[in-house]
C-alpha cells in the first residue's frame, strides 16, 4: 500500500500487539512523504479496547525499563510477569 500522500491515519480497532499497530502507522511515514501525518486512535470509554490500550502502555513502560537496564528489572512482581 502506498501511503506517501497520507495526512491522517485513523485506528478504529486496537490490536493486541502494539508493535503491529505502530508498524501500520509507520507505513504513512515512508520515503517520499512530504506532509506531516496525524495519527488518531478512536476508542470508546469503558470498553475492552480502552483496557487493551492501558495494558499496551504498561507493557511498553515495562519493556522500556528492562531495555534501559534500570533497577526496575530486578523488581518484577508476579502480576507484572503474568500480563
Image: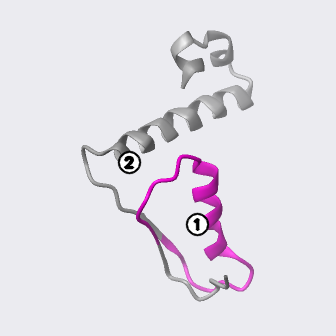
Span colored in magenta: 10-38
Q: Which residue is mark 2?
A: 49
Could you tell me how many numbered marks the image carries? 2
Residue found at x 72% / y 30%:
68
Q: Position of residue 19 (x, y in %)?
A: 64, 51
**Of the pair 16 and 72, the residue shown nearer to us:** 16
Q: Which residue position holds label 1?
A: 25
Q: Earlier in the sequence, mark 2 or mark 1?
A: 1
Magenta stretch contains residue 9: no
44 lies above or below 4:
above
**Quadrant placement of the N terminus:** bottom right
- Camera-near label (2 vs 1) is 2
Residue at x 42% of width, y 38% of height: 54
Q: Nearer the viewer, residue 24 or 64?
A: 24
| Image quadrant where residue 40 sits | bottom left
- Crowd band around label 2 with a 10 angstrom C-alpha radius: few (<14), some (14–19), many (20+): some
Task: Answer left or right for 13 relative to 15.
Answer: left
The stretch drawn in magenta includes residue 28: yes
Lateral position of residue 5 relative to residue 57, left or right: right
Q: Quadrant of residue 67?
A: top right
Amino acid at each position: 500500500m502506498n501511503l506517501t500522500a497520507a495526512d491522517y491515519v485513523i485506528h478504529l480497532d486496537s490490536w493486541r500487539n502494539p508493535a503491529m499497530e505502530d508498524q501500520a502507522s509507520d507505513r504513512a511515514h515512508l520515503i517520499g512523504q512530504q506532509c506531516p501525518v496525524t495519527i488518531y486512535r478512536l476508542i470508546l470509554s469503558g470498553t475492552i479496547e480502552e483496557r487493551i490500550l492501558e495494558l499496551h502502555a504498561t507493557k511498553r513502560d515495562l519493556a522500556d525499563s528492562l531495555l534501559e537496564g534500570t533497577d526496575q528489572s530486578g523488581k518484577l512482581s508476579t502480576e507484572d510477569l503474568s500480563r
